Structures are given as C-alpha cells and as structure tokens.
Image (spheres, rainbow, N blue to C red):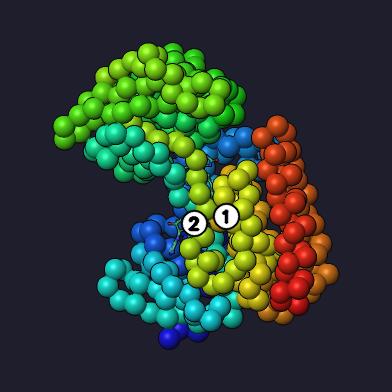
C-alpha cells in the first residue's frame, strides 16, 4: 500500500490544475490517469480558445495542455500514467490497476475525482456497424493518432463537439456531407458553426438518422425529418452515401467512483445528468472527497481548470498548508473568473443550473459532514 496526502484521479485540465495548486502549497500529491499521456481532452483540441486573455483566449487547447504539463513537471508532481482507478473504499483507499497487469492500493488523506465525461450514444438499426463512432473518438483519431476515420462523414449533433469535430475532419481531409440536428435550432457557438457553414457543409435541423446500411462497414445512412415532438415524419427519408457516422449527442459525467464512494447526487439535465452534490469549494458530500471538472457538470476546459484550482486550494487548506483567509481570498478570485466564463447566452444556463446546485450542496454538505 502506498500512502499519500492527496490522490487525484484524472490528469485532464481539472486534475492537472488541482495538482499544481495543491503542490504549490506544499501538499504531497499523486496524480493518476488511465492514459499513456496526461492532459485529458486538451490534446485533441487543436482549435484556439476564445473569451478573454485571462481565460487563455487565442491559445490552442493542446498548447494549454503543454503549459499545464510543464508546470506540473516544474513542481515535480508524482504521476502514474496507464493507471486505471477501478475502485474506492472507505473514502480513502483507491484500487489502481497499473499498466493493465499490477494492482495497487493508494491510501490518501484526501481525494479529488477529476474523471471527466463520456460520450452519449444513440441507437438505430445498423448503429453497431464499423464506421459508427463517437465524435470524440474521431477527434482522437485525427488529432492525436493522425488517422482519418473515413472519407465521407455525416455528423449527428450540432453542439460544440459536433461542429468543432466536423471542422477538424474537413481540415484533416475528409468530406463532411452534412451535420444533422434533432432540435429545430443549431446548438453550438456561432463562431464554430459559421466555419463549417462557410466550408459549404449543409446543416439539417429537425433531422435524425433512421438507419445505417452496410455489410461489414457503413456504406450509407438514411436520414429522416422530425416533427415538433421529435417523431419521425414518414415519407421524408432520404439516403446519403457515407462511410463514417459520427455521433455528437452529448456528454455524461463519469461519476462511477463518486457513486462507489457513497457521494450523494442531484439530477441536473442542463449539466449532463446525475452529478455529485458539491459546494463552492468543490467538496462532495463525503468528508475527504472533492470533485472538479466535467464530473461536476459538463462545461469546458477553461471552467474545468478553475474548478481544479478551487479543489486544490481547498484541499491544501484542510490539510493545513494554507490559511482559511488565504484560501477564501484566492477562491473568490477564481469564482470571479468562473462567473465571467459562465456569462453570455450559453454560459448563463449553466450558471443558473450550477447556482441552484451549489445552494443545495451547501445545505446538504452542512448536514452531512460538518
Ligand atoms: C469527447 C470530448 C470532446 C470535447 N471536445 C471539446 C472541444 O473541442 N472544445 C472544448 O472546449 N471542450 C471540449 N470538450 C469539453 C472539455 O474538453 C472538457 O470540459 C474538459 O476537458 C474537462 O476537463 P476534465 O479534466 O474534467 O476531464 P478530461 O479532460 O476528460 O480528463 C479526465 C481524465 O481522467 C481520466 N480518467 C477517467 N476515469 C479514470 C479512472 N477511473 N482512472 C484513471 N483515469 C481516469 C480520463 O481518461 C481523462 O484523461 C470535450 C469533451 C469530450 C469528452
């Protein structure tokens, strides 16, 4: 058994930021990630972030990832890669499978869960054919592994992941034959959607996939129009030749470890579904377990980094490395950043959902652990 002050599960933007803040304060940190390289989703993000300079606008996601890695190396943060955390016991013991062969127990005084999110799937006849994949999987293939998943692609879902990946597929040399959206309006930020429009890709709102055709891989897709109750309208079907179908139909927080740890949950559809209840310090309802990033509600890498910092600072305070006054002052600064990030049309909806969750969290946590 290995003993440590703080174990962080997930080395994406949230986990890395938490590790840096906690280590900066003097906490002995172990960062664990199942991948061969830290950075989570950041290394897929070859596009520039936008917003203000304080939020790294104009910098590509992968470069933000590199900056975080350099900082984490500067602080000498212990990192286990190829380490899958598959269990949690007593709120302190993590079961880690390392390199797919050896299992170890890590006993931590505090744990931060920063496990991110997983892609949602939708089913239709033929959805199990090779060539049907999550948009995130296609993004990993083109931007991380430099492999084109197919030559003629249809994207289901016009949210940010759908339009960003559609554009990146075009950049990688694929033909994107259409972007479909079940809702009557497009879902992504205008800046990303406009780039795909300018490239001449048609968007079909109120449309979905009825079936995929093919024998050992996708050869065509049948699309159909939806009415205002999302029911398919017979007679509106048409078939398009494609070899790849990308599903960008939302993300769900990866919460299994929080469930196993006994954290209490809320159901918040605007943030991706069931979420561990937490307070403004990212404290869950379990005494020594904090959360940060997409596990606390689907947002963006910029908010994940701020939440990671909050969790890292507040863990350092509970372990006695930072005074409460210092932590409160720094947390306030981070909250100002978060509130700015959560402004605007899309941000406001998330901010409202988060605010009501935090109110609830404060009450629940007060009764549970203090
Ligand atoms: C497929 C996908 C595509 C996205 N594309 C964009 C985009 O283009 N632009 C944008 O702004 N935002 C995008 N996002 C959202 C943004 O990337 C996230 O909000 C941000 O990365 C969240 O940071 P995080 O640290 O919470 O999670 P992540 O970056 O997902 O990092 C979590 C890490 O934890 C690891 N992990 C999970 N469970 C375990 C376990 N049990 N044991 C060990 N390791 C574990 C994961 O493998 C991962 O490395 C995307 C998200 C996804 C899922």
Along the horizontal axis of the image, is 305 left or right of 281?
Answer: left
Image location (x, y in percent) of residue 191: 58, 25
Give left or right: position of 248 versus 151.
right
Residue 347 in sight: yes
Count of marks overlaid on the render: 2
Number of other residues with Cα within 10 Å of mark 2, as a class: few under 14, some 14 to 19, many 20 or more: many
Residue carrying label 1? 274
- Helix or strand or loop: what does disc 2 sit on? loop
Q: Is mark 1 within 8 Å of ligand 1?
A: no
Front-most of residues 195 and 243: 243
If you read the primary sequence from the N terminus, does the residue marked by circle 1 or circle 2 appear first? 2
Percent from the top left, x then y, of residue 119?
44, 45
Residue 275 on image: x %, y % = 59, 56
Q: Is residue 228 left or right of residue 318?
A: left
Question: Which image quarter: residue 218?
Answer: top left
Q: Quadrant of the N terminus?
A: bottom left
Q: Is residue 199 visible?
A: no
Ligand 1 within 8 A of label 2's CB? yes
Q: Are marks 1 and 2 in contact (CB under 8 Å)?
A: no
- Which is more foreground, mark 1 or mark 2? 1
Q: Point out which mark residue 27 bears.
A: none
Label 2 sits on residue: 254
Give the x, y percent position of residue 365.
Answer: 72, 69
Q: Residue at x 39, y 14 (%)?
A: 236
Q: Which residue is at 27% across, 34% downward? A: 126
Quadrant assignment for the C terminus = bottom right
Quadrant hosting residue 320? bottom right
For the residues marked 1 and 2, what is the alpha-carbon distance in whole angstroms? 10 Å
Task: Tell me which residue sits at (34%, 77%) in the image.
Answer: 103
Give the left or right position of residue 131, taking residue 79 as reference. Answer: left
């Amino acid at each position: 058994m290995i003993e440590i002050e703080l174990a962080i599960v997930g080395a994406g933007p949230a986990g890395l930021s938490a590790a840096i803040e906690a280590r900066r304060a003097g906490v002995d940190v172990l960062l664990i990630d199942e991948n061969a390289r830290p950075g989570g989703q950041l290394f897929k993000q070859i596009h520039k972030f936008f917003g203000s300079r304080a939020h790294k606008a104009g910098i590509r996601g992968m470069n933000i990832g590199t900056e975080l890695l350099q900082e984490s190396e500067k602080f000498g943060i212990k990192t286990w890669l190829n380490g899958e955390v598959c269990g949690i016991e007593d709120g302190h013991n993590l079961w880690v499978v390392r390199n797919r062969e050896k299992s170890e127990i890590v006993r931590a005084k505090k744990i931060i869960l920063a496990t991110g999110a997983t892609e949602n799937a939708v089913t239709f006849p033929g959805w199990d054919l090779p060539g049907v994949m999550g948009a995130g999987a296609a993004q990993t293939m083109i931007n991380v592994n430099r492999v084109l998943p197919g030559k003629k692609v249809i994207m289901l879902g016009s949210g940010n992941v759908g339009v960003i990946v559609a554009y990146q597929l075009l950049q990688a040399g694929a033909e994107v034959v259409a972007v479909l959206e079940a809702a009557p309006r497009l879902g992504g930020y205008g800046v990303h959607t406009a780039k795909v429009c300018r490239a001449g890709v048609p968007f079909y709102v109120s449309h979905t996939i009825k079936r995929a055709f093919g024998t050992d891989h996708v050869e065509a897709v049948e699309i159909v129009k939806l009415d205002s109750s999302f029911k398919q309208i017979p007679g509106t079907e048409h078939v398009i030749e494609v070899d790849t179908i990308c599903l960008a139909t939302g993300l769900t927080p990866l919460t299994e470890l929080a469930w196993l740890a006994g954290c209490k949950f809320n159901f918040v559809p605007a943030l991706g579904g069931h979420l561990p209840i937490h307070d403004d310090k990212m404290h869950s309802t379990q005494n020594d377990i904090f959360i940060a990033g997409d596990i606390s509600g689907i947002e963006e890498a910029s908010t994940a980094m701020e939440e990671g910092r909050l969790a890292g600072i507040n863990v350092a305070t509970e372990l006695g490395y930072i005074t409460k006054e210092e932590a409160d002052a720094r947390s306030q600064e981070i909250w100002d950043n978060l509130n700015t990030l959560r402004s605007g049309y899309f941000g406001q909806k998330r901010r409202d959902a988060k605010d009501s969750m935090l109110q609830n969290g404060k009450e629940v946590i007060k009764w549970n652990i203090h």
